[in-house]
Image (cartoon, rainbow, N blue to C red):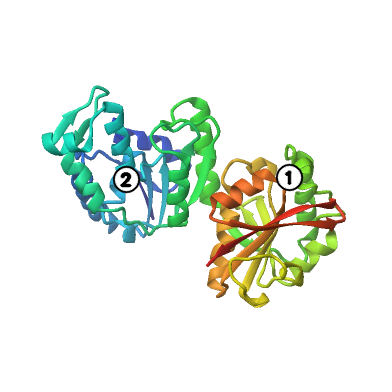
Amino acid sequence: MELVLYIHGKGGAAAEAEHYRPLFPGSDVIGLDYRGATPWEAGKEICAALGSLKGNYDRVTLIANSIGAYFSMHAGIDKQIDRAYFISPIVDMEKLIDDMLAWAGVTEEELHARGLIHAAFGEDLSWDYLCYVRSHPPVWDVPTEILYGEFDELTALKTMEDFARAQGAGLTVMPGGEHWFHTPEQMCFLDRWLLSCKARQMLLARSDDLPALRQKYIEVIAKTPDLYRHARWEYGKHPYDALLQGYMDRGEMLVLTDGREIAGMMALTMYQEADYHGIPWASGLPDGAVAVIHILAVCPDYAGLGVGRRLVREAVTLARANGKKAVRLDVLESNTPAQRLYESEGFTRRGKENRYAENTGWTDFLFYDYML
């Protein structure tokens, strides 16, 4: 039996857990009405509540909203949680407090001297709280998915990306989303994200999967806006049947599914070819010490749900598990969306070369790596 424990944000309530009940049929969905306003108080409450419940369940899923996620990371419960979903989490409280000091026109020295200051925007600024935050960085070792709104006013996107990368968490950004997910459109996006994350699993494509994969790549090419302008893909030139079949036959073709449909796919080779030899990589490594990402694609129905990011992280995880020292890839200079994804995941651009490919003609390719 699964327990789904919901931890609300500031001003929220345990009753919000009712929204998630239909999304977890067959599970007990319980919201916690904690009273503490600090991580050391709320963390103890969360830990105690989970301790009283855990013995009745063989699996625990955590859904935590805003500061509820921050408190959860200070509750010492990560060894008891099987999976977590964070919605607009506060992940860098020190930065947020520094920002609030600036908004209030208060210096750190003033806060130290006075101990507690009530800001005009309704928040209490506490020196003890700031000292605790600085001396107690979050500890979290749980498979986690994060939902973030593009216009979240409390946490910058780079801060969230850095946290997600450090934690190995999945990150999905809702275009136009806010810190507080509350409108019908935002809640619909949240539900779709949650259902998609729940069901995702990475599978190795079989040798007889060519018809299905061919159709998926054709759909990607036909339905992804501006794909030809960015990546110049044209099925039959790149990618093409023999390329996919070779990857599948060698056990190098991976698909990410939602339990019913393919959401994304890529090839991951545990070696590099000779055409990567002339690039000024961060480290000179033998071919067998490198993994290479090829033909990564997100199916149109799953665009914007973090599938591309999940694929990249799976590649890094698999490469590390296979003892590789780096993950490498190449991308067209015109493919700026792919460059943003890879750079946000910690890949570093190492070189540029003008090369010929059947689908592009002569054009500039950029080369990226991620050191393990």
Answer with left or right where residue 138 lies relative to residue 327.
Answer: left
Q: Look at the picture and state if 320 lies above or below 114.
A: below
Percent coordinates x, y for residue 201 in the rendering: 57, 57
Residue 97, percent from left and from top: 28, 38
Label 1 is placed on what type of residue? Ser
Give the secondary structure at mark 1. Answer: loop
Amino acid at pointer 2: Tyr
Answer with mark 1 or mark 2, whichever residue precedes in sequence.
2
Dot 2 falls on a residue whose secondary structure is helix
Q: Nearer the viewer, residue 250 or 138?
A: 138
Q: Which quadrant would the N terminus be assigned to in this image?
A: bottom left
Question: Disc 1 marks which residue?
Answer: 334
273 lies left or right of 53: right
Residue 344 location in percent, x, y?
A: 54, 49
Task: Give the residue pinned by disc 2.
Answer: 70
Q: Which quadrant of the structure image shows residue 105?
A: top left
Residue under the image location 43 percent in, 44 percent down = 159
* Vertical relation: 150 (above or below) 338: above
